[in-house]
Amino acid sequence: MEATDLLKKHKLRKTATRTEVLKEYLSAGRALSHAELEDKLGDHFDRVTLYRTLHSFEDKGLLHKVYDETGTVRFSLCSDHCDISSHEDDHVHFHCTKCGNSYCLDLPIPEMNLPNDLMINDVYMVANGICKTCQRA
Amino acid sequence: MEATDLLKKHKLRKTATRTEVLKEYLSAGRALSHAELEDKLGDHFDRVTLYRTLHSFEDKGLLHKVYDETGTVRFSLCSDHCDISSHEDDHVHFHCTKCGNSYCLDLPIPEMNLPNDLMINDVYMVANGICKTCQRA
DNA sequence: ATTGCAAATGCAACTAAATTGCAAAAATAA
DNA sequence: TTATTTTTGCAATTTAGTTGCATTTGCAAT
């Protein structure tokens, strides 16, 4: 789906920042942090606006968080059926410890039995290793 | 095991900071961040020293990282068989999204088939939910 | 016990990451 | 076209983490 349509679908006003940010995520193929977004977009947008854009995209179900051992929080496009009421990003992530990039894998999180005195909402899973590109280098 | 013995076992010099920090982890029963450690220990130790203590503890296999969607990096005691050459903290973690506390669960990470073009070193897993204490509150 | 040396600490300064409040500007609905 | 609400940009602030260096300390060798 295109940037404009995605914004409309999630009831977000169409602004220059949002459109551009969304385009970056649509073409990135990997998770992007606030800092990486700033790099890609140059000085055209305010730092704070970018933070707020990411947060509203997450709230509305366009992006989901992708995090790793470095403490860097990145975001990645959600699947079609995420919205403001629920995120369903139940796939495994991959984090390359060499280049730092993170990717969503098309792989469901395995079932498991968790203690039933804990109210579990979702499970996050990330495999750490070396990506194809870094293996060659 | 006691703090002093743990330091010796991992070939770390015994200092006041290290002993006290280790005691906190031994009694905490949960993962602690740098900031939480500062709170617990008061002004007796230097901020920078605490950062360096945490890093050397991780290097030597006394502590392992525990991270979550907030980007806060915490640490938790390793099992006995971790050392400088390998961490084997292959258990599931729990993160309470209300109080922010994180815990190690005594639950192995389920097996799964990962793409074989990726060189996987370890898998990290965290269940997000509401802890017992917060459920009551 | 004393000494020598490597390792650890404390401090100051710095870099980076993230948030807040507010006034101005822009997007949508009426 | 206007009114209303949302978003933006800016300045300031807070929080987190790092670096370099001089001083101190732990510990092993003597």
Image (tube, coloured by chain):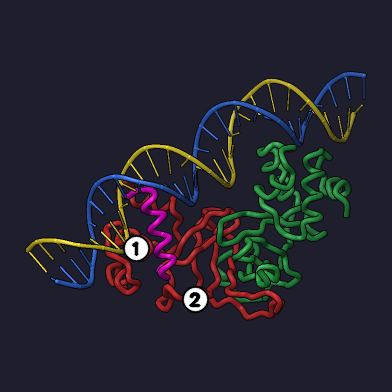
Chain colours: A green, B red, C yellow, D blue
A24 up-or-down from B24: above or below: above
Local crowd size for mark 1, using a 10 Å CA cut-off: few (<14), some (14–19), many (≥20): many
Classify residue C19 as left or right of residue A55: left
Q: Amino acid at mark 2?
A: Glu
Q: Nearer the viewer, residue B20 or B18?
A: B18
The quarter of the image holding the N terminus of chain B is bottom left
On the image, numbered disc 2 is attached to which residue? B88
Q: Rounded to the nearest whole Å, what is the CA distance between mark 1 and mark 2?
A: 19 Å
- On whether residue A34 falls in the magenta region, the answer is no
Q: Chain of mark 1?
A: B
A7 up-or-down from A117: above or below: above
- On whether residue B51 falls in the magenta region, the answer is yes
B88 up-or-down from B53: above or below: below
Secondary structure of the residue carrying numbered label 1: helix
Q: Place residue A75 in its image quadrant.
A: bottom right
Classify residue B110 as left or right of residue B14: right
Residue C22 on image: x %, y %: 63, 24
| Pointer 1 and pointer 2 on the same chain | yes
Q: Which residue is drawn at the image coordinates 71% and 68% (left, top)?
A: A91
Secondary structure of the residue carrying numbered label 2: loop
Classify residue A88 as left or right of residue A116: right
Report the magenta residues as a range.
Answer: B45-62
Q: Could you tell which of marks 1 and 2 lies nearer the N-terminus? A: 1
Q: Which residue is drawn at the image coordinates 87% and 46% (left, top)?
A: A4
Q: Main secondary structure of the magenta part?
A: helix
On the image, numbered disc 1 is attached to which residue? B22
Q: Nearer the viewer, residue A79 or D13?
A: D13
Q: Which residue is drawn at the image coordinates 29% and 65% (left, top)?
A: B13
Q: Amino acid at mark 1?
A: Leu
Q: Which residue is drawn at the image coordinates 64% and 65% (left, top)?
A: A95
